[in-house]
Amino acid sequence: MPYCETSDGQKIWWEAEGSPENPPLVFSNSLGTNLAMWDGQIDEAAESFRVIRYDQRGHGRSSAPSGEYALERLGRDAIELLDCLGIVKTRFCGLSMGGMTAMWLLLHHPERLERVALCNTSAHMPTAEMWNGRIRNCTENGMGAMVAGVTERWFTPAFRKENPEEVERIASQIRATEAAGYAGCCAAIRDMDLRADLKKIEAPVLVVIGDSDPATPPEQGELIADNIPGAKKEVLHAAHLSNVEEPQGFNSAVLNFLR
């Protein structure tokens, strides 16, 4: 079974596509989704890369231990996955929480990353009260209570109207996420502040911004792009899940950069 075990005894589920001879590329999912959020990227990415998708801790088929998580733990999960798979250095694409994980890796294990796409993400996401409220909501009312608010933030009104099947595909991932895992990751995001360290990042970075993203607004992406030396920037007409809402533009920008 495609699991890797972490140093704290949890299991991380992963899947691979593309030739093992291709250079590796890791995709890291957002809060509340699983590796299937990348379905629109895989066919094209696998032409050039050995694509590794994994379910972040608390999501999909990976372990969802109770209690608060830290961004460091999410980053170490990614490093331990690379170790498990024998990958010394990789390209990396993370969206939202996946992008936060990627920034932690760029700061603490830069030797493991070749080129990185930071998509619809933020280096700091206040307020703590908002995250604590979200933790209470999912814990007391279940993940079904999260779906309407999340999908409204993640997709533009036009996309929600014209693509209900895609919205439902993502909504089903939110409902399937264990509340304990979602809450644990909410705590990691609540406690994160990477702003002061962005200028230390040296790897080639592309920052992808959704111009209609209320979850990680454009100014948060601009802050990342402005503070990472040499970072490139791509703005897509999309809300939060730009890879789902604008897959062609996303694939062109991200895969061309990572190649």
Image: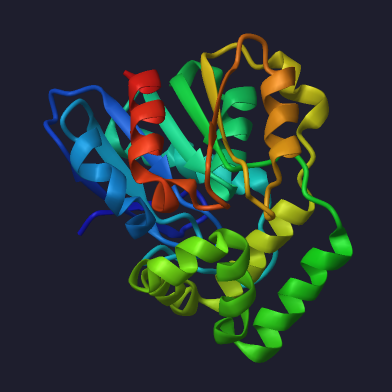
Q: Which corner quadrant of the image does residue 185 belong to?
A: bottom right
Left or right of 255, for residue 137:
right
Between 235 and 4, the one lying in front of the other is: 235
123 vs 63: above or below:
above
Image location (x, y in percent) of residue 99 = 56, 39
Between 24 and 85, the one lying in front of the other is: 24
Q: Residue at x 24, y 54 (%)?
A: 2
Q: Residue at x 82, y 66 (%)?
A: 130
Image location (x, y in percent) of residue 134 = 73, 73
Residue extending furthest toward the bottom: 141
Image location (x, y in percent) of residue 112 = 45, 22
Between 204 and 182, the one lying in front of the other is: 204
Q: The N terminus is located in which quarter?
A: bottom left
Q: The C terminus is located in which quarter?
A: top left
Left or right of 137, for residue 55:
left
Image location (x, y in percent) of residue 60 = 40, 66
Q: Residue at x 34, y 72 (%)?
A: 165
Left or right of 111, for residue 149:
right
- Asked if residue 170 can be seen in this view, the reply is no
Q: Residue at x 40, y 37 (%)?
A: 250
